[in-house]
Image: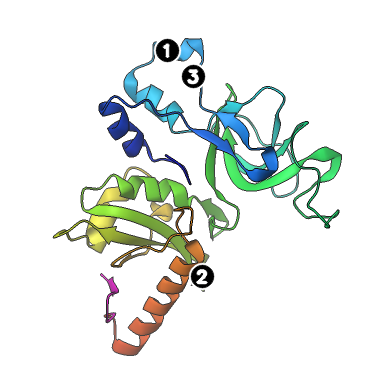
Amino acid sequence: IGGSASPSIMISRFQNQGVMVRHVWGMTETSPIGLAATLKTKHEGLPAEQKLSLQAKQGRPLFGMEFCIIGAEGEPIARDGNSFGSMLVRGPWVAASYFNSPISHAHAAEGWFDTGDVVTMDADGFVQIVDRTKDVVKSGGEWISSIELENIAQAHPAIKEAAVVAKPDERWGERPVLVVQLNPEMNFSTQDMVDLYTGKVPKWSIPDDVVVVDELPHTATGKLLKIAIRAIVVNNLRMESLDDGTASGDLYRY
């Protein structure tokens, strides 16, 4: 499995077929692996559901790699598995600069490299990517993880694939919108969406809208193409403003 983080439901389905799944995270600049979701000895006796929650994380730092989680003002973030911030990494094989570009916003002081990921880290060192910095929904002073909302949606039987992006909001700055591709002969309404998220995330994290599309756009490596999905949402909202609440063509908002 490659390209992006695997939802718990996908990991579970693979393992039900006898395929062991282990999350590994890295990027070109880390040459290439930095984290691996290898369980500690103390985790081996955990119930399957608790093991799965650890497997769904991106993992613990490999030998030789240092990770630092910082807040918006550069302050260190608690390693409690809940507080999140920007992830910096450094090590002997982490790229020190880009070719013909000795100065980069990604390369911080003291050898730290800004990965562009927003993460949590627990007391055992397990890192979980909350979102890409550019994809976090910033709503009313709170950060909402698009990845968390996507993983929950992905487990719904009507949904083949899901993406969450931000839409502009005059009051809150941004609000999340759920964009889904449905399985054949299936339906999914706004009420279905509210029911799906209620009790799983804070009320203010529940998306305001759901948009159904024929197919979600992807990059060449299979990742969701968020910039194109944002354009779909903006276009759909514009269409609604013209036709009094109902989108036309292959886009529908309930």
The answer to which of 37 and 102 lies nearer the viewer is 102
Q: Looking at the picture, which amino acid does disc 2 mark? A: Arg
Residue 145 circle label: none
Observer-nearest of 148 and 140: 148
Residue range corresponding to the magenta coloring: 247-254
What's the residue at 35%, 89% (across, down)? 242
The amino acid type, in three-letter code, at marker 1 is Glu
Q: Residue at x 40, y 82 (%)?
A: 238
Examine the residues drawn in magenta and state their main secondary structure: loop
Residue that label 2 marks: 171
Q: Which mark is residue 44?
A: 1
Asked whether residue 235 appears in the rendered view, the answer is: yes
Kindly identify which numbered label has been placed on residue 39.
Answer: 3
Q: x, y percentage for residue 184?
A: 17, 58
Query: Along the polypeptide, which appears first: circle 3 or circle 2?
Result: 3
Secondary element type, mark 1: loop
Residue 76 image offset from top left, x and y in percent: 72, 37
Residue located at (68% from left, 38% from top)? 30
